[in-house]
Amino acid sequence: MKKGLLDLLKGKFLVSDDAPKNWLFIIFTSFLAAVMIGSSHSADKKVHQIAVLSEEVKELRSEFVDIHKDIQKLKLESTITQNLAGKELYPSEVPPKKIRVKSVKE
């Protein structure tokens, strides 16, 4: 047991007769570790990007609601009448009449 641990610490498994097999395994595991680290960084980057976009959506939705509320106020008859009073335009006192067109049969 002591000899096996000592050989492992000295790195004899890298220079023994089976060394090429060991080196290939070490290179393969190093490659897999690099791929895993890169994938983790990519996932973290996407999570942060999603958080930023979510905040932007919340802000834009709030802005939309505010602007929609202002537009609804501007559409009110009282607001239109008030704005046009400065230009000396007033609502008609006579209500509009319907015009009915009778179809002509040939």
Image: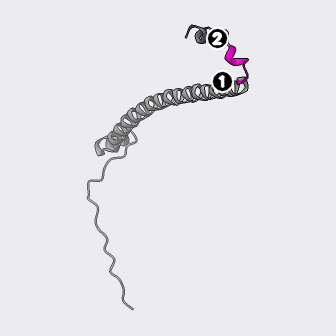
Q: Would you identify the image quadrant in which residue 27 lies? A: top right
Above or below for 35 versus 95: above
Q: Which of the two residues, 100 or 93, is positioned nearer the viewer here?
A: 100
Which residue range is magenta in the image? 12-18
In-front residue for pair 48/25? 25
17 in the magenta segment: yes
Type of residue at label 2? Asp
Q: Position of residue 54 (x, y in %)?
A: 44, 32
- Of all residues shown, which one is farthest toward the bottom? 106
**If the image is split into quadrants, where does the C terminus sit?**
bottom left
Does dot 2 land on a helix, a strand or a loop? Answer: helix
Tag 1: residue type? Ile
Q: Quadrant of the N terminus?
A: top right
* Badge 2 density bin: few <14, some 14–19, many ≥20, Cα 10 Å: few
Q: Which residue is mark 1?
A: 26
The percent position of residue 73, horizontal first and vertical second, equals 32, 39
Category of crowding for the residue at label 1, using alpha-carbon neighbours closer than 10 angstroms: few (below 14), some (14–19), many (at least 20): few
To which residue does mark 2 refer? 7
**Element type at marker 1?**
helix
Q: Is residue 5 above or below residue 78?
A: above
Percent from the top left, x then y, of residue 102? 32, 80
- Asked if residue 66 is positioned above or below residue 7 in the image, the reply reads below
Looking at the image, residue 41 sits to the left or right of residue 75; the answer is: right
Tell me, yes or no, whether the two marked residues, 1 and 2, touch with CB atoms within 8 Å: no
Residue at x-position 36% and y-position 36%: 65
